[in-house]
Image: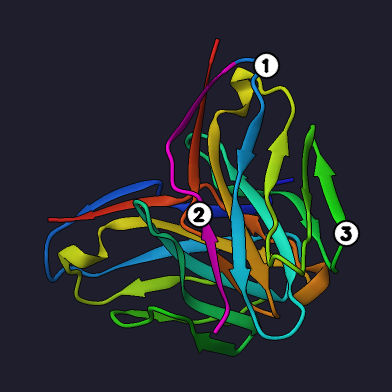
Amino acid sequence: GNSVTQMEGPVTLSEEAFLTINCTYTATGYPSLFWYVQYPGEGLQLLLKATKADDKGSNKGFEATYRKETTSFHLEKGSVQVSDSAVYFCALSDYKLSFGAGTTVTVRA
Amino acid sequence: NAGVTQTPKFRILKIGQSMTLQCTQDMNHNYMYWYRQDPGMGLKLIYYSVGAGITDKGEVPNGYNVSRSTTEDFPLRLELAAPSQTSVYFCASSYATGPDEKLFFGSGTQLSVL
């Protein structure tokens, strides 16, 4: 079946540091890939998505590229801010969403 | 816009009690979902619905029931609460599945069963 594996946290960074969260997937077919973000005390919200191989999703300075050859969708941001502190979930959809376990990111001033 | 509204935000139950978690959305979405979020485990799908009158089981349906009498509402029922049901519950809705899928989540219900 479909599954998503993302790097375990927690991750603690200083402001302006570079952030990478690794995500790999297993799927039959050609799923769409997503990153969702959960800020403290809130529900999840869509951060970015990519629907086919080599697509790059981007939003709020975050980027992720759909790599079919390595079955990966790593999330990156070049310079994080305190406001980026959240839990990040990688997910895939083959007409039903499967979520990774989430990675907690804390950015210190 | 209200989006997806869940009530209550917090609840403590005793073992064996029952309760209903309410979920309503005002976006006219056909697809609605209930997830539970356990620490370090990500989100697990409990039940989902593709439209009024149609529901189906997700990965972890045991101990729960749902109904979908209207497009707007998708309540989740716990009949005999057990400590294993201590979790954070999220309701979500979407207008499509597959490539155009985008879930809108409620703010969650934190449930403790003691």
Subunit of label 2: B
The amino acid on which the numbered mark 3 sits, given as a three-letter code, is Asp
The disc, 3 or 1, on the residue closer to the chain's N-terminal end is: 1
Instruction: Classify mark 2: helix, strand or loop.
Output: strand
Write down the region rendered in magenta: A1-14
Residue B73 visible in this rendered orientation of the protein = no
- For the point 83% across and 44% down, which residue is it? A58
Subunit of label 1: A
Mark 2 is surrounded, within 10 Å at the Cα level, by few (under 14), some (14 to 19) or many (20 or more) other residues, namely many
Q: Is residue A59 magenta?
A: no
Q: Quadrant of the C terminus of chain B?
A: bottom left
- For the point 72% across and 76% down, which residue is it? B30
- Work out whether residue B28 or residue B62 is closer to the camera in this orientation and state it: B62
Instruction: Classify mark 1: helix, strand or loop.
Output: loop
Residues at marks 3 and 1 on the same chain: yes
Of badges 3 and 2, the one in the foreground is 3
Task: Measuring from the top left, give residue B94's x and y in whole percent.
Answer: 71, 67
Q: Is residue B45 above or below residue B51?
A: above
Task: Measuring from the top left, give residue A68's x and y in whole percent.
Answer: 77, 69
Q: CA distance from mark 3 to mark 1?
A: 26 Å
The amino acid on which the numbered mark 1 sits, given as a three-letter code, is Glu
Q: Which residue is mark 1?
A: A16
The amino acid on which the numbered mark 2 sits, given as a three-letter code, is Gln
Q: CA distance from mark 3 to mark 2?
A: 34 Å
Instruction: Classify mark 3: helix, strand or loop.
Output: loop
